[in-house]
Image (spheres, coloured by chain):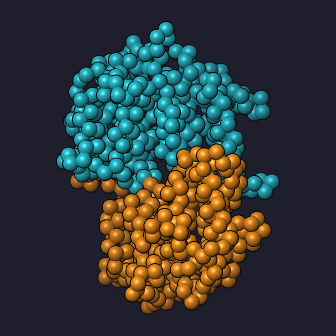
Chain colours: A orange, B cyan
Amino acid sequence: MQTNGTSDPSADGGLPSWNDGAVKRAIVNFVTRAASEGDKDFVLPADRIAVFDNDGTLWAEQPMYCQLAFALDRVKALTPERPEWKTTEPFASLLQGDLQGALAGGGPAVAQIAAATHAGMTTEDFETIARDWITTAKHPKTGRLYSEMVYQPMLELLDYLRAGGFRTFIFSGGGAEFMRVFAEGIYGIPPEQVIGSTGKLRFEMRDNKPVLVKLPEVDFIDDKAGKPVGIHKHIGRRPILAFGNSDGDLQMLQWTAAGSGARFMGLVHHTDADREWAYDRASHIGTLDTALDEANAKGWAVVDMKRDWKNVFPFETRPGAG
Amino acid sequence: MQTNGTSDPSADGGLPSWNDGAVKRAIVNFVTRAASEGDKDFVLPADRIAVFDNDGTLWAEQPMYCQLAFALDRVKALTPERPEWKTTEPFASLLQGDLQGALAGGGPAVAQIAAATHAGMTTEDFETIARDWITTAKHPKTGRLYSEMVYQPMLELLDYLRAGGFRTFIFSGGGAEFMRVFAEGIYGIPPEQVIGSTGKLRFEMRDNKPVLVKLPEVDFIDDKAGKPVGIHKHIGRRPILAFGNSDGDLQMLQWTAAGSGARFMGLVHHTDADREWAYDRASHIGTLDTALDEANAKGWAVVDMKRDWKNVFPFETRPGAG
């Protein structure tokens, strides 16, 4: 497993990009106790399960989800084969650069875009397309590769947890197959620990070779109440640590909190308009409203990005970069 | 992780219950090469994925699937609360001991029995019920606990693979939640590596506590073409070793075989009417027909239980038992 831009875990307790404060101290305290045999909060290694949301928790989700940018690029690339899209919504608006108009149709419009760009090919073909894209696609605001738009403090947290014998998982509303293309390289999280939304698949033989064909039908949405369902289906144990950033993560945090013994529930609160973005209750992307209230009421950790993070992105920490 | 009745892996190459023969030699050769750095068939540890069917591959499935016996016992236990079952099929036949009559309705009858016995409760309540049952339920022919009806040579194979750096997974048509109750104890396979058929779940809050309620609707059938789909969804990598015993495992074997590099595909052929059962093409349980033809045509390993296994069950190897 390889991680990108993480620091020597021995330096500064492994969390050098975290300012000293309540959240960092709570993390260190929790992990140290979970890994200390004899401590009343010691946890057997097999149960040291940490689950993370992806968009807005491990990497930036503004001004649009990375996977939506991927879908838009796919629509453009496929339009020569699908000329009817030029006059059919939601594709027509998309192709004119009117994202808001394209998404005005809500869920059904998103489903149409997803089906048009994520289905009708084998899983292997999709993997190749997604891998090629993520290798070169650049973030519209920073001009950085999307794979560089990860949060340095969260990379350190993932490493710190693994050094403490935790296994780290992603449970994201994003597509499982899309994330698996990059999650091992940028987060050190192997494919079997990356769970997300999925479409239905059909097994078939083509030229005596078995393939899995991606169908334009939703199989599972790993968001909101789907997250604890996904956790139960994929792990079958309750996590002891969960980190999210939006109301879509609330049920995952509640499910984690409801187990017995010590627990850690965390939210990334986007409070830094200078280095990243500042948004919460009124945002359409990554709405953080009821989950913030519940975190405050229950004493869950809330990362104030501006105050708690010394650096946000890995490129800020590299001399001469940024 | 704990295994039941396995031998010291250092003795006899870790496979003391396997007679020396083509299958044993092929296993040892494959595992040794996969784990030998520098060998042309060396495989990185992360890719040493071995997948197993459960019923008829790791433990006995005759005269009926263990989980069906569980469902029958649940029908009997629940009948006082559901007196209408005494006059409603498929329950009426079941309660009169007429299994064949009860299952005459085919898939819909099985679905009705499954829904009546596996849904309408929380995942935690189901786990308690299943755990209590498997702790005491006895096999109708041998009078042994079901958990003792495991194949000693396969327990040794699981241990042998893990000693070679493999991760072992179950992909079974049986229920994931049912198997997870016992798979760690008897096979040393943790819940997150036990994949099976599932029903839909609903997240809800009960007395301020989140629960997952088991619904009477099929979510996923992990059998036949569902097995490679399940493998892709849960692991996202292609296995390099697969073991089954019936036509329900054919697509899993084909999917495994179609990867690049060295592969191992195996079938358990039930040929031992004295120590276990003898059945294949004409059997209703564990039908082995087209998969046997394909295994023979492609040179996959076919275990002849009578010839290849020194012992079948763990209790045969214990002095004074059996």
Q: Position of residue B198 (x, y in %)?
A: 55, 46
Residue furthest toward the right? B207
Q: Position of residue A11 (x, y in %)?
A: 49, 68
Whether B19 is drawn above or below B84: the answer is: above
What is the tally of numbered marks visible in this picture?
0
Q: Quadrant of residue B163?
A: top left
Whether A14 is drawn above or below A273: the answer is: above
Residue found 29% across the figure and 20% down from its top: B19
Whether B306 is drawn above or below B114: the answer is: above
Residue found 54% across the figure and 50% down from its top: A235
Q: In this view of the protein, can residue A50 be seen by the observer?
A: yes
Whether B164 is drawn above or below A79: the answer is: above
Q: Quadrant of the N terminus of chain A?
A: bottom left
Residue found 55% across the figure and 39% down from its top: B180
Residue furthest toward the front? A11
Horizontal relation, residue B76 to residue B288: left or right: right
Q: Quadrant of the C terminus of chain A?
A: bottom left
Q: In this view of the protein, can residue B107 be seen by the observer?
A: no
Q: Position of residue B58 (x, y in %)?
A: 43, 30
Horizontal relation, residue B129 to residue A57: left or right: right
Q: Position of residue B274 (x, y in %)?
A: 39, 12
Horizontal relation, residue A217 to residue B74: left or right: left
Residue found 45% across the figure and 70% down from its top: A7
Query: Foreground: B7 or B61?
Result: B7
Residue furthest toward the top? B320
Residue furthest toward the left? B40
Query: Foreground: A109 or A265?
Result: A265
Q: Quadrant of residue A266?
A: bottom right
